[in-house]
Amino acid sequence: MTEPAGHHLTTLPSGVRVVTESMAGARSVALGIMIGAGSVAESGREAGWSHLLEHLLFRGSARYGSREIDERFDAFGGEIDAGTGRESTSLSARVLDEHLEEAFDIMADMVWRPGIAPADVASEQQIVLEELAMYEDDPQDVVFDLLGAAVFGAHPIGRPVIGTRESVSGADSETLRAYHAERYAPGSIVISAAGSVVHERIVELVAAAEQADVAGRRSVPAPAPPTPEAPRALFRERPTEQFHITFGAHGLAREDDRRIALRVLDALVGGTPSSRLFQEVRERRSLAYDVSSFHSEYAGVGHIGIYLGTRPANLEAALGAVVGELERLRADGLAPGELDRAREHAKGRFVLALESPYARMGRLGALVLHDRELLEIDTVLARVDALQEQDIESLAAELLDPARLSVAAVGPDEARFRAALDTALPGPARMAA
Amino acid sequence: MPRFSSTTAANGLPVHRIGLPGTRATTLLVAFDAGARTERPEENGMAHFLEHLVFKGGEHYDDYRKVNETAERMGGVLNAYTSHDLVAFHITVRAEAVMEAADLLSDFVGRPRVDAEELDKERGVVIQEIQRYKDQPSAVAGELIERAAFGDHPLGRTVLGPEEHLRTFSREGLMAFRERRWSGRTGGAFVVGNLEHVPDDGSLEDLIARFPDLAEPQAAEPVPDFAPQILVEERDTNQSHLRMLLRPEVTPDDPAERAAFHIYSTLLGGSMGSRLFDEIREQRGLAYSVFASDHVASDHGALYMGAGLDSTKCVEAYTRMREIVGELRDEGPTEEEVHRARSYAAGRRVLAFENTNAVAGHAARRSIVHREPIDPDLAIAQLDAVTHAQVTDIARRVDPDDLAVACVGPHAAADFS
């Protein structure tokens, strides 16, 4: 018998949630454990601890040593990966279905019963400090961290997930064990699986493996979302070949129904090769190789932005071109056919991306973890189709007003950058810190 | 089980169909034996520049906007890549749109305008791409190791080419390169995934026949003898990016030996359970990232090793990584290690082959670089068949003292001698 299409969701008595979706024809299973522990709920002292703890999950658990975890996953040809973001930590794997139970057994032990031995904390701290130093060498990483500070000031949503040298060095095995006990709470853990999978079997596996705890207890809540502040312009001088420049502002919260319109707006501003910024800045005027826009949604707050890398010779022209395109969109609205194309693009990408069990698992897990409605794919497509030009235009008028954009840049000459910015982006002076 | 068939378009370009079960997507990929290693010295950068320029339009989709807007309207993912070995163009769409996608791709790639004005504009874009690379130390290290290993040979030059070249390339030169290298006889078209909407009445072949009918090109300049160097780009950073390249003897047209070489590089540094990952990263904490990988071109094999690390630990890691290669040469891998690496490599490939684009890319390499059949199941079976004795044999051929070294960081070449 085949499973019906669509997802299945079960909440265990402990509060742990299990969501799965069976996909016809798949031989593999994508399996994820998502935990509501991310950088936004960290204090300054704890900055980067969620990420450090994620590293430590791989250092051994009650029943599996570090080397054993690596070797077991190697032996069944699976890939296991982990990531830490602003609102969550995730451990995910892709394996052939015959290895599902064994893979889950190891992952569950890593998440619920990590060793966190003092020697392992010390060596993982060293590795994370190296990771930090590597980011500092990459101007693109630096400029995005700087933009977070420019848009969100001191609020933790704008801080780098990895933390600082001081906060990472300040953790020890005792504090991290307490941190794990507090943050990896059953009501903030979601198991997600997609591909060749039977829902009831996953529920049984989770029920057998989970750690007993106060039923329904949730992780530490995030602080109240930040309110918009006056725009800033932050610069870091580095002897780079290009100026790496970002513009950014508050976007839409995850709860905001206009997020589907934002996805389409982002595609036509800078998300695709026929987008306005790509056409004008790269194709028509050859001012950059990379120019793109992005958007991220979180609980109660969102982030939009634009990135470009340009040679010093093109600095003034490139800044002027980006600001000019934003002004033009606000003043003239959409061109004929533009909405239709962006809608088809958004729908096509959405459907093609969900061909992969891994992408489907990630989407389901994130929606459940953040208590969002699980829309069927057809519902999402219908909502994209229902968008009108006016929905996009009013969103552009609100979000892409140059007067509200903060700026962050990395490059060889701060004075020159600030002068160029003042010309391209007149209006209120932007705070330098 | 995949289903295959192959036909040939009127211009000599083979058209391979690989049907995969359980997918709603289809990929069309067209590739030629026209990568950077086929460039003459003054042409370095041209293969990649030409790849950029065809996107400016063909006969029907005659400008950049039409090409990209058409792909977007289909919800397709359209892209291209150039390596030393080949150039490839690919589009992935919902199965129903496959013939529209073939019409688009065969138009602008098969009948490109290569407009002189667009050419001038695109120079600036690629120059920016080169500059961007220079701001990424790991990318700089990746280019430097090729020069350290292959010197002034096409394989030692960068795919992007030097900035000066980009300023001088002419339409005439680009079209001459295309005439010389983009022959269907050494290229291929690959349609992979859901084939329900791919007709068998010759209409796909008619679209593919839009590519010009060109004579078979000459073989690329053979790989030079190994004269490895140590090249350091001194940068005042806290991090070092270390790369090594070794050239063990591997028979490029022996699939069994290539598979054994891949298992070797996997157990050396291709997975989390590998020797380099376990010792350099986990036990000694010397590096944040460390890896080994194998690459087999048409006439040679190369083993790459690399690490991103704290500069004060760079020389220690360099020494220890070579010692690990030496231990494998002298003592061989364990049975258990080979078993694990084999399961890992084969399992990874099964997972990767659930993606139509990955199968198409693999098929193109097999067919164009190695001139071999393109059955994805066979590629997996060849990994499964690798024995401990074969991997031990490969390990014996890897000499840890005969290697090219490249490093970006606060070092001098003498640190690595």
Image: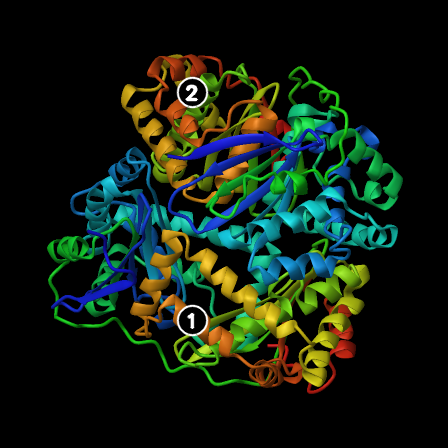
Q: Which residue is mark 1?
A: A380
Question: Nearest the camera: B19 or B366?
Answer: B19
Q: Quadrant of the C terminus of chain B?
A: top right
Q: Which residue is mark 2?
A: B260
Q: Quadrant of residue B110?
A: top right
Residue B202: % across, % down? 61, 38
| Label 1 secondary element | helix
Label 1, label 2: how many angstroms apart (C-alpha)?
47 Å
Of all chains, the one bearing label 2 is B
Residue that appears at 50% across and 74% down? A385
| Direction front: furthest residue | B201
Residue that appears at 50% across and 19% down? B400
Residue B107: % across, % down? 71, 48
Residue that appears at 62% across and 85% down? A397
Q: Quadrant of residue B390?
A: top left
Is any atom of residue A108 visible in this view? yes
Count of marks, rendered view: 2
Q: Residues within 10 Å of mark 2 (few under 14, many from 20)?
A: many
Asked if residue A68 is positioned above or below residue A401 in the image, the reply reads: above
Of all chains, the one bearing label 1 is A
